[in-house]
Amino acid sequence: MNGGRRLWLVRHGETEGQSSIRYHGRNDVPLSDVGRAQIRALAPLLDGVAFARIVHSPLQRAAESARILAELLGQDRERFRAEERLREISFGACEGMTREEIHAAFPEFWAQHQVGDIEGFPDGEKRVDFTTRVASFAHEVAAEDWSGDLLVVSHRGTVRQMLRALLGMPPAAKDSFAVDLASVTVLHQEPAVPGAVWQLELLGAVP
């Protein structure tokens, strides 16, 4: 296998349900016009990269973000693939709420959440289950025999868990990974062989 390989991790743009202020996990909210503009503005940061594959969360905010990027970058749509393991974590009974609304509806839970002492949101997906499924995808990709560039379009929590998995960090480790809406994070591996160390090349870049 020749050369290194890079993994480009993109978070979707703003949604109709305001991802910037609301806890949208499994809620399948579409991109807003603002979100589409954010993704279009992101394209120049990826310009000139020939992606071997484009993998995305099946939720429409990520799928549409991937389509927009592919069209602007002239990527072959036959290389698209939806991946169930890239879905965002489910926030259960808190889906669609703001921080203030969650605090008012579930005060005891929110107090525990603020100190990091929770297994998951009320009626939501357990954190251990979320980290396990995302890590399984990340390690599967890392073990595959490929070189070049791979684009993954998903969600804030998913991107952060992929970083933890590939950088060898514990799933619940404290980090400073800024993953803003319509941002790109790049991991680089040299040489391009399964088991080689992944390094952070670019974190949370936005237009």
Image (cartoon, grey):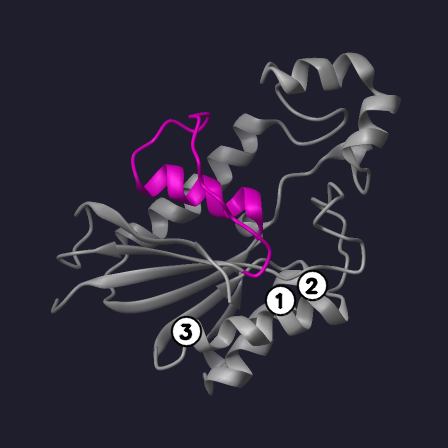
Q: In this view, does 193 lie to the left or right of 181?
A: left
Q: Which of marks 3 and 2 is nearer the N terminus?
A: 3
Amino acid type at mark 2: Gln
Q: Distance between the residues labelled 1 and 2?
A: 5 Å
Which structural element holds mark 1? helix
Which label's residue is closer to the chain start, 3 or 1? 3
Q: In which quarter of the image is residue 163?
A: top left
State the residue at coordinates (20%, 51%).
194
Quadrant placement of the N terminus: bottom left
Q: Which of marks 3 and 2 is in front?
A: 3
Q: Residues within 10 Å of mark 3 (few under 14, many from 20)?
A: some
In this figure, which residue is indicated by the disc labeled 3?
Answer: 46
Q: Which residue is drawn at 66% across and 73% down?
A: 37
x, y percent for residue 186: 36, 57
Distance between the alpha carbons at the discs numbered 3 and 2? 21 Å
Closest to the observer: 87 or 12?
12
From the image, tell me which residue sits under label 1: 63
In the rendered structure, are the residues bearing label 1 and label 2 in contact, judged by CB atoms less than 8 Å apart? yes
Mark 1 closeness class: few <14, some 14–19, many ≥20 residues within 10 Å: many
Residue plotted at (37% across, 38% down):
165
Give amino acid for label 1. Answer: Ala
Residues in magenta, as a range:
155-182
Q: Secondary structure of the magenta portion, mostly?
A: loop
Amino acid marked by disc 3: Leu
Left or right: residue 206 versus residue 189 is right
Determine the residue positioned at 71% across, 26% down: 121
In this figure, which residue is indicated by the disc labeled 2?
60
Q: Position of residue 77 (x, y in %)?
A: 51, 82
